């Protein structure tokens, strides 16, 4: 079984990534060059991390450190992931749709998962 990847359709992720945010859950990550990391507090609960040298979107994480999703597009080869989940489906524009069969969660369902301490795969 491949590691799982989710996409986020929320307006903040779409604006930040230029499309949907495709990410995977990561409990621990270490960067070789911490000096090139920029952080943007995008909400009262989340922040976005990017490379200040090239602008690449690197990850979304809870500001309290409880949840981190790394951008699949930041990897050289993200093809090993299984696309399983779409979140904030209620914010997805009508202009696109994925053909893959996925679990689809609304924003309210995602926040309920966070509140119950489960893994919502937020991007």
Image: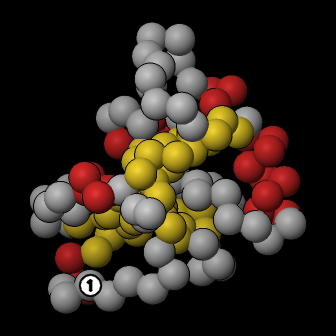
Residue 14 location, quadrant: top left
Which residue is drawn at the image coordinates 45% and 85% (left, top)?
28
- The image shows residue 30, relative to residue 20, as above or below, that is below
- The image shows residue 70, relative to residue 82, as above or below, that is below
Q: How is the image coloured?
A: secondary structure
- The image shows residue 38, relative to residue 108, as above or below, that is below
Q: Is residue 88 something that shows in the picture?
A: no
Q: Which residue is mark 1?
A: 31
Q: Which of 118 and 55 lies nearest the eye of the viewer?
A: 118
- Quadrant, the N terminus: bottom left
36 left or right of 121? Answer: left
| Percent position of residue 22, x then y | 40, 48
Residue 2 location, quadrant: bottom left
Residue 32 location, quadrant: bottom left
Which residue is drawn at the image coordinates 35% and 42% (left, top)?
17
Q: Is residue 45 something that shows in the picture?
A: yes
21 left or right of 12? Answer: left
| Percent position of residue 87, x then y | 62, 41
Which residue is drawn at the image coordinates 67% and 57% (left, top)?
120
Q: Which of 67 and 48 lies nearest the eye of the viewer?
A: 67
Q: Which of 52 and 111 lies nearest the eye of the viewer?
A: 111
122 left or right of 75? Answer: right
- Determine the residue located farthest toward the top in the rendered image: 95
| Percent position of residue 106, x then y | 73, 36
**What crowding class fits label 1: few (fewer than 14 Cα within 10 Å), some (14-19), or many (20 or more)?**
few
Count all numbered tags in the image, as a single digit: 1
Q: Which of 98 and 46 lies nearest the eye of the viewer?
A: 98
Q: Secondary structure at mark 1?
A: loop
| Percent position of residue 4, x then y | 47, 58
């Amino acid at each position: 079984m491949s590691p799982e990847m989710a996409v986020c359709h929320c307006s903040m992720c779409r604006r930040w990534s230029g499309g949907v945010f495709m990410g995977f859950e990561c409990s621990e990550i270490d960067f070789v060059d911490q000096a090139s990391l920029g952080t943007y507090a995008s909400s009262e609960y989340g922040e976005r991390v990017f490379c200040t040298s090239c602008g690449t979107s690197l990850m979304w994480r809870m500001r309290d450190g409880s949840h981190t999703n790394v951008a699949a597009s930041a990897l050289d080869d993200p093809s090993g992931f299984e696309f399983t989940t779409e979140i904030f489906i209620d914010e997805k524009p009508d202009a696109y749709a994925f053909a893959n069969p996925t679990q689809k969660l609304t924003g309210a369902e995602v926040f309920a998962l966070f509140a119950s301490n489960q893994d919502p795969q937020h991007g």
